[in-house]
Image: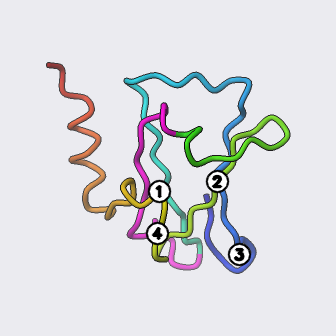
Amino acid sequence: MTVDAAHARPSVDVMASSFRPAPTTHFTVLAWLPVENRFHDDFLMFPSERLVEFAEEQNGHYIFQFRPGSVTRGRLKGYRRHLGELRTMTEDLLVVE
């Protein structure tokens, strides 16, 4: 996802026909800031099984908006993280119990 003047309302789009939620699959949504040549300090990470709880189905796609840096309300609030947490969160998901 790119966040800049050309993408004033950035959204995440998942093709519904190929979407297969699973407890071992998570989405990670990073926002690219092209002018600054870096990722935004905020990102989302959530279990794939939760997508249908906040995404709308439109024309065969699950779509939701993510505005990094804004106040998050509703169901996305618990999934917003600081970029510095990405490595640890990813490693925690890879740990075999």
Q: Are marks 4 and 1 in contact (CB under 8 Å)?
A: yes
Residue in the foreground of this view, choosing between 31 and 55:
55
Image quadrant in which you'd find residue 7: bottom right
Q: Where's residue 44, x and y in %? A: 43, 54
Q: Is residue 92 magenta?
A: no
Of callouts 2 and 4, which one flags the residue occurring earlier in the amino acid sequence? 2
Tell me if residue 91 comes above or below residue 24 in the rendering.
Answer: below
Q: Is residue 40 magenta?
A: yes
State how the image is colored: rainbow
Q: Which residue is mark 1?
A: 76
Amino acid at pointer 2: Phe
Provide the residue span drawn in magenta: 35-50
Q: CA distance from mark 2 to mark 4?
A: 13 Å
Q: Which residue is mark 2?
A: 64
Tell me if residue 33 comes above or below residue 76 in the rendering.
Answer: below
Q: Where's residue 60, x and y in %? A: 81, 34
> Is disc 4 placed on a helix, strand or loop?
loop
What's the mark number on residue 37?
none
Q: Which residue is mark 3?
A: 8
> Is disc 3 placed on a helix, strand or loop?
loop
Q: CA distance from mark 4 to mark 1?
A: 7 Å
Amino acid at pointer 4: Thr
Q: CA distance from mark 2 to mark 3?
A: 14 Å
Of callouts 2 and 3, which one flags the residue occurring earlier in the amino acid sequence? 3
Image quadrant in which you'd find residue 20: top right
- Which residue sits at x=74%, y=24%? 17
Q: CA distance from mark 1 to mark 2?
A: 10 Å
Q: Which residue is mark 4?
A: 72
